[in-house]
Amino acid sequence: MRLSAYFLPTLKETPAEAQIVSHRLMLRAGMVRQSSAGIYSWLPLGFRVLKNIERIVREEQDAAGCQEILMPTIQPADLWRESGRYDDYGPEMLRITDRHERDMLYGPTNEEQITDIFRHSVKSYRELPKLLYHIQWKFRDEVRPRFGVMRGREFLMKDSYSFDVDKPSAMRAYNKMFIAYLRTFKRMGLKVIPMRAESGPIGGDTSHEFLILADTGESEVACHRDFIDADLVASDIDYEGDLQHLVDGFTDKYAATDDERDPSKEKELGDALVIARGIEVGHIFYFGTKYSKSMGAVVAGPDGEDTALEMGSYGIGVSRLVGAVIEASHDDAGIIWPESVAPFKVGLLNLKTDDNGCVAACDGIYAKLRSAGVEVLYDDRPERAGVKFADMDLIGLPWQLVVGPRGLKSGTVEVKERKTGERPEMPLETALAQLTA
């Protein structure tokens, strides 16, 4: 994409409403614009990052054996009355009435909807287990939305749901999602820590949050120091095998959100205790028969008797992850995207757009990178070099390929790695080989 044709409304000054790094940089880098309190439009650069994160989430859910569906954003209130949550959920739920005076709601989550689908579709234990997921926009009417996409009212979520005939089977599904989450966040360059957590309005007695440590975290958390340097999960996982030992390797070490902290255990840890602030990026729940019993979701068991389904739900904040990655990876100049989620891999800078040699060289490099499948943002604007460098650092592409007339005379270009800041000169062919590897 040529930057001269790209819609990238960057800002030099930080808007007053932006309180944390990710919000400031997303606004300044032209990724989002606020529509109303806690609701954002995603502009081309931000949307590309959002779709890359969504792709990684989808790939890891598929690898774990989940099947993708798509449920609506608007749900009938009657389903929530069946589960008992319609009145219990509180003012965060956006309740609406359609033209026929039917009570509806903008879904904050989908346990009732998926239970309704499943109870009408599956009748025998022989059809179990099943793991279903969708990626959909949700709405929660936060009393004080803040921190940009980190705590908005409208947000993109991945929800998956497990259905099993008994608790041991349900815990195998829980373990699958536990490991799949570690793999998902690792691919995004995030160091996450699984922590015991409250189940809240979802319900159930087993729950873990996945948090990254950041100064701007919403709550104080505590964990064993071993989590900080641990390689959380191996690349090869047999999801049909026994994953309990892997999960135990994490849950045996102390890690808890603010509501679940244990002062006596923290005292025992001594110097091994780390207290920090955390940002939640995922949450998993086992809630057994909470919804299946109240909504009549049963199957014929091995003995022919009706058995209430054992269920769990597993959420990842897809849009929130955009902000979380920035919180974890930035410097004073701007964002530093991990390559896996970056909107473009390479920023190509033509330092002299009125020089025919530079233009011809950059056009050729642009064509070669694109033909090699490399996503490139080509800064062909007639701007000063300083402006181009500042914009590229702000939007945080992993690599910058800098072309100027002086270097071209000797057949060299500069290749800057955004993460390290190093900008060595090298022959053009060497640079192309490096960036297309």
Image (tube, helix red, strand yellow):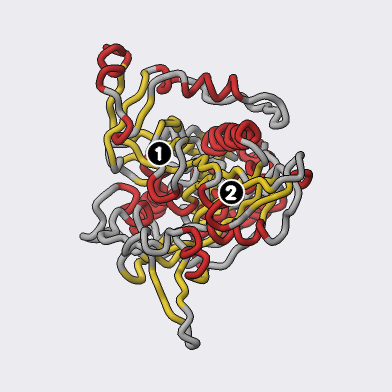
Residue 74 appearing in the image? no
The three-letter code of the residue at mark 1 reads: Ser
Q: Tell me if label 2 and label 1 are in contact, CB under 8 Å.
A: no
Q: Is residue 315 above or below residue 80?
A: above
**Mark 1 surroundings: few (<14), some (14-19) or many (≥20) residues within 10 A:** some
Quarter occupied by residue 128: top right
From the viewer's perspective, is 222 left or right of 417? left
Residue indicated by mark 1: 329
For residue 282, side relative to residue 61 (left or right): left
Q: x%, y% of residue 84?
A: 44, 59
Q: For numbered disc 2, what is the local secondary structure?
A: strand
The image position of residue 56, as x and y in percent, is 60, 45
Q: Nearer the viewer, residue 290 or 282?
A: 290
**N-terminal label among 2 and 1:** 2
Q: Which mark is residue 160?
A: 2
What quarter of the picture does the C terminus occupy? top right
Q: Residue at x 36, y 46 (%)?
A: 334
Q: Position of residue 399 (x, y in %)?
A: 51, 42
Label 1 element class? loop
Amino acid on which disc 2 is placed: Ser
Residue 121 percent across, percent down from the top left: 72, 59
The quarter of the picture where residue 270 lies is top left
